[in-house]
């Protein structure tokens, strides 16, 4: 059976106090409980640590040797507790963040300098995965996910919602013409996702009121790849506002079917495991992102 911290504390308290009575008072225990704890420690170690006389307690040679180990162990525990308390007040350590490439590039990365300035002792590790990753398997502390959440084991903190728009570059529209009716999309190059198929549901309805599901001319698993292809004039694309705001404001991408576009908004959440004690570095990072984005982060 292993020695416990309670036993080490009792032993050190008896030595420092000079008696079991003084140690009991310091530890807020009864004299009998303190005596039993000390006896249990000696039994585990199979040695006598203190000689008991009618007037005082004296350390044996073994007790003197063990005393230093006991003090070192208790000091290490105190230091560890102090360090953990300090981490709650001043975030330190490695923070692994996961997000799809577009969100990482357009939302997370621009806010990293401000976070690093505020919390220089947090070591950021930024990873991009286009699909849903297992946080434990990928050793991820916090992930930013776009769309409805399905994993009930995750705690989610809402970051905002982002609308969808149909977009194309001026160069593409000049070359191929600007479609004004949904039926005309069949005559154009459409850029879409190869997975999941639900991302090819565009926020438009045909004359019969049916939703529009497109078959991509060119497909990719990455929204950022689709954005770059749209900027290069390769076709028409449907992308989330969070990654195209600057493109639209500068005129690099132009919105199509503005009046017909449905107000479809993708929820964006920061997620971490529900049964994980929330480290201060996670809280500070998510707080920083939310604060930097403002109240209506992904709207015009």
Image (tube, rainbow, N blue to C red):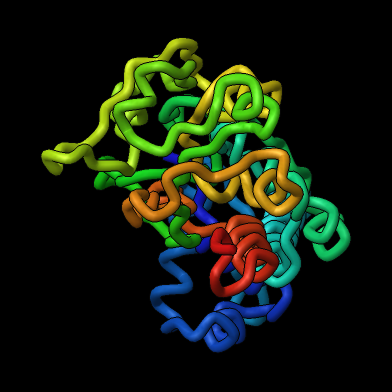
Q: Is residue 155 above or below residue 235?
A: below
Instruction: Residue 290: name its quadrant.
Output: bottom right
Which residue sits at x=51%, y=63%? 6
Q: Is residue 27 above or below residue 145?
A: below
Which residue lies at the image location 34% right of the left edge and 50% below the top edge?
Answer: 260
**Quarter of the rendering occupied by the N terminus:** top left
Q: Is residue 295 shown above or below 256?
A: below
The foreground one among 167 and 87 is: 167
Residue 65 placed where, x, y %?
A: 77, 47
The quarter holding residue 17 reads: bottom right
**Residue positioned 72% across, 61% down in the render:** 91
Q: Is residue 275 left or right of residue 294?
A: left
Q: Is residue 31 left or right of residue 254?
A: left
Image quadrant containing the C terminus: bottom right
Residue 1 is at least partly visible in this image:
yes
Q: Position of residue 288 (x, y in %)?
A: 68, 64
Q: Position of residue 182 (x, y in %)?
A: 32, 33
What residue appears at the point 35 percent right and 36 percent down from the top-left corner? Answer: 181
Q: Position of residue 104 (x, y in %)?
A: 64, 39
């Amino acid at each position: 059976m292993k020695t416990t911290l309670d036993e080490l504390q009792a032993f050190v308290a008896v030595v420092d106090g000079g008696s079991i009575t003084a140690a009991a008072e310091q530890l807020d225990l009864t004299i009998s409980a303190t005596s039993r704890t000390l006896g249990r420690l000696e039994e585990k170690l199979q040695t006598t640590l203190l000689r008991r006389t009618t007037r005082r307690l004296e350390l044996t040679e073994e007790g003197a040797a063990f005393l230093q180990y006991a003090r070192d162990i208790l000091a290490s525990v105190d230091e560890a507790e102090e360090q953990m308390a300090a981490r709650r007040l001043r975030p330190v350590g490695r923070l692994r963040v996961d997000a799809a490439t577009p969100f990482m590039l357009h939302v997370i990365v621009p806010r990293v300098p401000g976070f690093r300035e505020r919390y220089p002792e947090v070591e950021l590790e930024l990873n991009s995965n286009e699909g849903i990753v297992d946080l434990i398997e990928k050793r991820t502390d916090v992930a930013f996910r776009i769309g409805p959440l399905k994993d009930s084991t995750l705690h989610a903190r809402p970051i905002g919602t982002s609308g969808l728009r149909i977009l194309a570059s001026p160069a593409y529209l000049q070359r191929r013409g600007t479609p004004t009716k949904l039926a005309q999309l069949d005559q154009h190059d459409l850029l879409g996702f190869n997975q999941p198929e639900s991302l090819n549901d565009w926020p438009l309805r045909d004359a019969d009121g049916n939703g529009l599901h497109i078959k991509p001319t060119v497909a990719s698993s990455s929204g950022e790849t689709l954005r770059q292809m749209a900027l290069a004039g390769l076709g028409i694309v449907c992308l989330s506002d969070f990654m195209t705001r600057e493109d639209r404001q500068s005129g690099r991408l132009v919105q199509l079917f503005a009046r017909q576009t449905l107000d479809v908004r993708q929820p964006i959440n920061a997620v971490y495991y529900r049964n994980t004690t929330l480290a201060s570095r996670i809280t500070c990072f998510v707080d920083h992102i939310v604060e930097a984005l403002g109240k209506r982060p992904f709207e015009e």
